Structure formats: structure tokens, C-alpha cells
Image (spheres, rainbow, N blue to C red):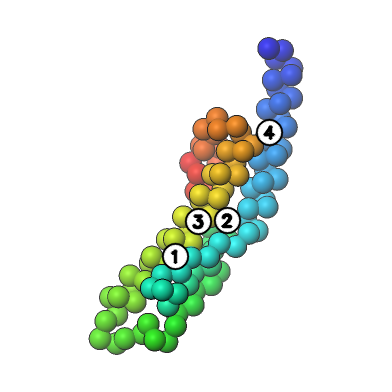
């Protein structure tokens, strides 16, 4: 294969990956736990932007359950973001396994 052609393809792939990263960083990902009692929303840049807790989930006698619901909702939202990012990047890279390219949550 022509080295120049390969370099052009690599540069194009890098440009496409950067554009995709920017688009995904701006997207919101939501996950809820406890039947919707706790919902977390994160951005694709792995920042938590919203956490909603139904007042019915607040039981002073069972704070541990609420803590578990919060952790589950946040982790689920982050996982949804990572999964989507991996899937979208896989489309660009053709499944070449380039997760260690400085993409948050993929390397």
C-alpha cells in the first residue's frame, strides 16, 4: 500500500475522530435507578450535570439504599456515555481497537 495514501487516510481518520469526540462531549446521557427514583445525567465529556432524586426515595432510616441508588444512576449514565463513545469511535476506526488514543473513558 502506498505510504502517502496511508498517511492521508490516518489524517482523515484522526480528523473524523476529533469531530466525533467534540460531538459526543456535547451529548447528554441519562440513567435511572430504583424504578426512576434517582436519575443522573452526564455529558459525553464525563461530567455530571444533573442528579434528580424523588422525595419518596429519601428515607432517613435507610440512607444506604439512597446512596446505592445514586451511585448506580451515576455509574449507569457514565457507562452509557462510554458505550456510545466506543461504538461511535468503532465506526470511524473500523474496529481497529484504538481506545488508547486519549479519548476520555476509552483508554
Query: Is tag 2's residue or tag 3's residue first in the polypeptide sequence?
Result: 2
Which residue is tagged 3? 80
Depicted 36 relative to depicted 12: above or below = below
Name the residue beneath numbered marker 1: 74
Q: Secondary structure at mark 2?
A: loop
Secondary structure state at the residue bearing disc 4: helix
Q: CA distance from mark 3 to mark 4?
A: 24 Å
Q: Which of pointers 2 and 3 indicates the residue nearer the eye?
A: 3
86 on left or right of 11: left
Q: Earlier in the sequence, mark 1 or mark 2?
A: 2
How far apart marks 3 and 1 lie (CA) works out to 10 Å
- Tell me which label, 3 or 4, sits earlier in the chain: 4
Disc 1: CA contacts within 10 A as few (<14), some (14-19) or many (>=20): many
The crowding category of the residue bearing disc 4, from other C-alpha atoms within 10 Å (few below 14, some 14 to 19, many at least 20), is: some
Which tag, 4 or 2, sits closer to the chain's start? 4
List the residue tagged with mark 2. Answer: 45
The quadrant where residue 47 appears: bottom right
Q: Earlier in the sequence, mark 4 or mark 1?
A: 4
Q: Residue at x 56, y 44 (%)?
A: 87
- Residue drawn at 58 percent across, 56 percent down: 44
| Disc 2 packing (10 Å; few <14; some 14–19; many ≥20) | many
Query: Along the horizontal axis of the image, is 84 left or right of 73?
Result: right
- Which residue was labeled with disc 4? 13
Q: CA distance from mark 2 to mark 3?
A: 12 Å
Mark 3 vs mark 4: in front: 3
Amino acid at each position: 500500500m502506498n505510504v502517502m495514501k496511508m498517511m492521508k487516510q490516518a489524517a482523515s481518520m484522526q480528523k473524523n475522530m476529533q469531530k466525533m469526540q467534540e460531538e459526543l462531549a456535547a451529548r447528554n446521557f441519562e440513567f435511572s435507578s430504583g424504578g426512576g427514583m434517582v436519575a443522573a445525567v452526564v455529558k459525553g465529556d464525563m461530567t455530571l450535570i444533573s442528579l434528580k432524586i424523588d422525595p419518596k426515595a429519601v428515607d432517613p432510616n435507610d440512607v444506604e439504599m439512597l446512596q446505592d441508588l445514586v451511585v448506580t444512576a451515576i455509574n449507569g449514565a457514565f457507562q452509557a456515555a462510554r458505550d456510545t463513545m466506543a461504538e461511535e469511535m468503532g465506526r470511524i476506526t473500523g474496529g481497529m481497537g484504538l481506545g488508547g488514543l486519549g479519548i476520555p473513558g476509552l483508554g
